[in-house]
Structure formats: structure tokens, C-alpha cells
Amino acid sequence: MDSIKEDNSYSYSIKKIYSPLPCSQNDLVDSMQTYFTLYKESIAHPELFWGNIAKEIDWFEPWTKVSDGQFPHCQWFCGGKLNAAYNCLDRHLSGNRKNKTALLWEGEFGERLSYTYQELSQEVARYANVLRRHGVNFSDTVIIFMPLIPQAIITMLACARIGAIHSVVFAGFSAKSLLERIVDSGAKVIVSADGGFRRGKIIPLKERVDEALKHTTQIQKVLLFKRTGAPTGWCHGRDYWMEEEASLVENTCEPVSLDSEHPLFILYTSGTTGKPKGVVHSTGGYLVQTAFSSKIVFDLQEDDLYWCTADIGWITGHSYVVYGLLANGASVFIYEGAPDFPSYDRFWQLIEKYKITIFYTSPTAIRSFIKWGPQWIEKHDLSSLRLLGSVGEPINPDVFLWFYKNIGKEKCPIVDTWWQTETGSILISPLPKVTPMKPGSATFPLFGIEPEVVDEKGEPMPAGKNGLLVIKKPWPSMLRGIYRDEESFKKIYFSRIPGVYFTGDGAYKDEEGYFWIIGRIDDVINVSGHRIGSAELESALISHPAVAEAAVIGVPDSEKGEALIAFVTLKEGWTSSLDLENALKEHVVKEIGSIARPKEIRFIDALPKTRSGKIVRRLLKEISREGHISGDVTTLEDSQCLDKLIKG
Ligand code: PRX
């Protein structure tokens, strides 16, 4: 675990930006004074606060108690019964929203699909019936391995409708990563596609499914969508075309009444161990908080067209493409492809064409836009935009200002939203039109959330001093556990600082109480806003026959936030070469997926280790970032290896 440096001088020179948009009479919060008053009330009386918020969701049976239990095991809206798909669909069908666009999709080649709330609800019912027909029962886990097409979202909601638990695996993951998630989740059914498109090339999803299924007999049915039309292998009795199956069933399906604590989904994320963790989310608490935060953070209005560029394989796609937005009856735009294909102005074309009003993306994407130059933006009319958002990584103040000026034209507030797979919803964020922005700061906690920056003993840090970011009280959308791994759940989040939830992030608060997130302080690396555990990368490298030992670190990267550098020692008989470097990079891609491709492989004679044999990644980081070591190295087994590294 890293120690965190104390240099926050730059933030004080940053000027506040007051919202370019005034509040209207309909806004829930119209000033910082109201925010502080309501915030204090929400912290003083959380039961009252969350009890009122939960009334915005439709319940089949009311809860008897708002919350129960303490960290690590908390329950919310106890005894309440609801259905997430009903809340995202059916409840909008009785009024004007019935014919409102729920989902609007564009494919890489300009194909377009659109669903009203009524159409979406019928499709969801159909897929739910297909899932049942193929043996998916209440509480079964279904793996979804799909490109970003509407059918992926329909499948998620179909699972929710019948009380099955979805586990979406990002389509960029390898067959091996998919297999690992299949086995851990215990799923018997996979919903996938023949493939997907990325920059005009086919991503062979079915091939990866077939490869993964060579190593397990657990999966009984594979339901496939046709996206690319490319020929695929076929296993009779196991593989079925989803559309053919859907034509055989009814387009109605009663939503199952589920306990508030019934798991809605499992989403795997990288942690400090070599194995991805299956983060489990509930139905009631998750839905209440994602719906509420969507409404206040994105200031949703009935005529908005909202676009979040995240894939549904990540938590952002779950909370702020699907559940939070559809629960509010919003119109959601999704795009299958990359921002630079076929040209660098693809995103701006889409914003202009569809008149998108809210655009939520990542600092990595913004850094790419900056690199590609303003000429791609200037060609397009972006005047429909009224709100911008950022998520996934710290946003550098200059990147924030560029976004504000070049995309928002100084007319759109930016919400820099801090949260995690585990938190389920945004916990720290400005409220647009209300919170004065400080470029680079996620600003203040949302209602009902009590974050603090503390030292190792849990004592609050003074203003301006770096410490550990913790959340002091439970919140409705917090993770309910790590699937089949109670020990890691307790150890990772609740043991380092007793009595609170430890986020794994370093942060500080400035004198005005603004939160500044520095980044991960555990062995998790954030590449382009995607979490990758160093241990996972290291096991991938060690599985190559040439590698004896490996240590992977993240170093600052002007485009991706952090880039991966792998230090490896070779087994007897192998020598370093450019070919071997490339082979190792490819090996990691094959083992984990392309998001994990190391930027550089450095061959060294020995890794720095403590006498007890633990690799000290901190020193590798220091050498890579600063070219020297300032700390104590006397506890190392062999400090000479570091001298060589520094000279090298
Ligand atoms: O380090 C923080 C960073 O992303 C981590 C969570 O990653 P993940 O679970 O994949 O979820 C990403 C999408 C919510 C956090 O521990 N992070 C997320 N948002 C921000 C951020 N760092 C700084 N500022 C943010 N706004």
C-alpha cells in the first residue's frame, strides 16, 4: 500500500467557476445554503431522509424499516417488495411516457434503433420469457457478454424482471477472463452475440464463448444475438438464436415481486488479489439511490436526451445508462463504437445529429479529444448540450477547463462525479447550477453520504493534508458483499480502519470542505478509467513460460491517466528481446483482454523484495516516476537490483 505525498499547493490557486445556468423554480436545490441545510438534515436523520426518497420508487409492498444493521452488513428498506424492471418500464406506461423514447441506439455504421417505453417493455417481457423457457429460474445467475447494442440492456432488464441475477462481462475481456467469471458466478446460461464491431473490425464474441466453454461444463445454454452475421461455431442443443426464440413467446411477462435485498446483479471488478471480485448489489437500495442521484446530479428534465459513453460492462453503464436513468423515465442514447472511428469527430456528429443535451464521459476520452485538436469540434453545432459530466478518474484541472470551454462553450456546468463499482451510485459530486465548481475537485458529498479523509487510525486529517478516503455511514446502494467471498469483503473494505468503509482512494479536503480525489492507494491501477489489479496482471505474465517473476505498476500517462509498466525476470534459457517483449504484451491481452496491454515491459535481473519475499512495487514506482529513490531500502533482500534499475 502506498504512502501518500502531501502537495496540494496547486489546488489553492484554482479559481471557482460559478454555474453559467441559473436555477429554476422547479429545481430541488436552488442554492448552496439550501444544499448545506438539507445535507445536514439528511445526515442527522438518515432514516427520515432515505425513507422519503424511497417513495419515489414504486413498491409492491412497503418496507417496514428503512435500514437495519451496521457495516459490513446493512439492509435497506427491509421487508419492502419491488421489481427493478417494473420501475424502469411498466410504471411509465400509464401516462405520456408510454410513447416517449426510452432507448436510442446508433451502430458504428450509422444503423439506428429506437424503442419507446412501451416497445422496450414488450421486448423485455419477450426476452424474460425466453430466459425462462431455457431454464433460467428465480435467483439464477446469467452471464451477459455482449457488444453495446440495445439487446444487451433488454437482457439485463429481462433478468431483473424474473428475479434472475445478471452478471455483465465487458466485451473486451478475453476467453480466460470470461471463463473465470462464469465459474465464479455459477451461471448456467450465457447471453451473447455472434460478435460486435469496434473500429470497423469484428470482435469475435462467440469464438471467445466457445473457447471459454471448452474448459467448463457448467453452461447449459448459450443464447445469441446476430450482430455481425459472421459465421460462428455451433453446438446443437446448447446454442440458440435469441431472436428466433423470442418469436416463439409472448410479449407479456408479469414482473416478479422481489425482496428489497434480493441481488440485482453481480459485477466483477479488479482488486488487490489476483482474482476479480464479484461485487453484489441489491435491488431496493440500489434502485432508490441510482434513481435519486441520476435525478439530482444530471438535473433530469422531461425533454433531455442523455448520453453516457460508458459500456454496460462497467458499473457506470449499469447505474447511469440503465437503472438510474430508465427509473426516471429518461431518454437514453447509446453508441456502439469508438470516438475516433471512422473519424475523430464521431461523437460531435452524434451530439449534433440527435441534439443530445447531457453528455457524461471520462477524463481519458477528453484527453483524446484534446490530442485530436479543435478542428474536429468546430465543424459541429453542439448547442443542444446543457450539462457535462466526468467519471472514472481524477480529472486534471486543465482537462476540466478544456472540456468546459471547448465542449460546453462556457455554458454547461460540469459534474465531476466520484464513486466506485462498490458504492453503486455517485457519492461525491457537484449539483449542477448550484455548486461552484473547482476544476479537478468532485466538490461535496450528495445527501445522506458522510465521507471523511482520515489517517491510518481513522482520525480526520486537517484541511489540505492527504489521507485515506472513507465513508462513515452505510448508504442504500452500497455493495452487499463479494460473491462467495465474505472474508475478502470484510478485509478489503472494513478492516484497515475499523467502523468505516475504506474506499482504497487517497484524498484531501481543502479549507472550504471541497473533496479532492488523488487516486488509488492500493495495488489497483486505473488505466483509462478501468480498474486493473497488479496481482491479476502479474499472474497473467507469470503464466508465460519465459517469465519467472513479475511486478506491474501504474505510471502517470498524459492520455490514459495511468499506463502499465511490467518488470519481469526471465527463467533460465530465455533472453530479453523486442520479440519477447511483444509476445509478453500479447500474452497479457490473451489472458485478460486488450485493456490490460502493458505499455512497456522492462526486463530486470531481480525484483526488489523485502526479506520476507514481498515485492516492493512502491520502489519500482518511485524509480519510474522520479528516477531515484528517496526512502529507506535497508529492509530489502538485495538493494543492488535497484541500483541497476536506476542506472538502466
Ligand atoms: O479511484 C477512483 C476512481 O475510480 C475508482 C473506482 O473505479 P470503478 O469501480 O471501476 O468505477 C469507476 C466508475 C465509477 C475510484 O476508486 N474514480 C472514479 N470517479 C472518480 C475517480 N477518481 C477521481 N475522480 C472521480 N470523479
Image (cartoon, rainbow, N blue to C red):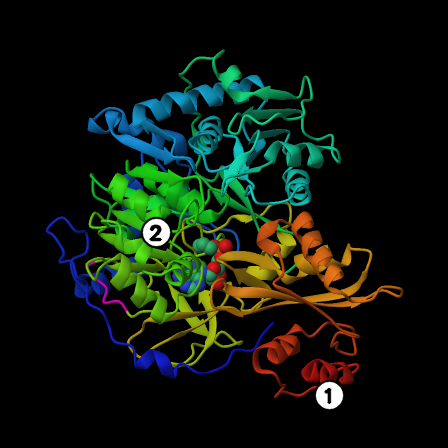
The single residue placed furthest to the top in the displayed view is 248
Q: Nearer the viewer, residue 489 or 134?
A: 134
Q: Examine the rendered structure and indicate whether residue 205 appears above or below residue 426.
A: above
Disc 1: CA contacts within 10 A as few (<14), some (14-19) or many (>=20)? few
Dot label at residue 436: none
- Secondary element at image label 1: loop
| Residue at numbered disc 2 | 360
For the point 27% across and 40% down, the residue is 353
* Helix, strand or loop: magenta stretch: loop
- Secondary element at image label 2: strand
Separation of residues labelled 2 and 1 (CA atoms): 47 Å
Instruction: Give how far across and how far down residue 185 sits, in percent.
Output: 63, 39
Quadrant position of residue 210? top right
**N-terminal label among 2 and 1:** 2
Whether residues under marks 2 and 1 lie with C-beta atoms below 8 angstroms apart, the answer is: no
| Residue at numbered disc 1 | 634
The segment highlighted magenta reads 433-437
Q: Amino acid at mark 2?
A: Tyr
For the point 31% across and 27% down, the residue is 117
Q: Examine the rendered structure and indicate whether residue 106 appears above or below residue 455.
A: above
Q: Nearer the viewer, residue 91 or 299?
A: 299
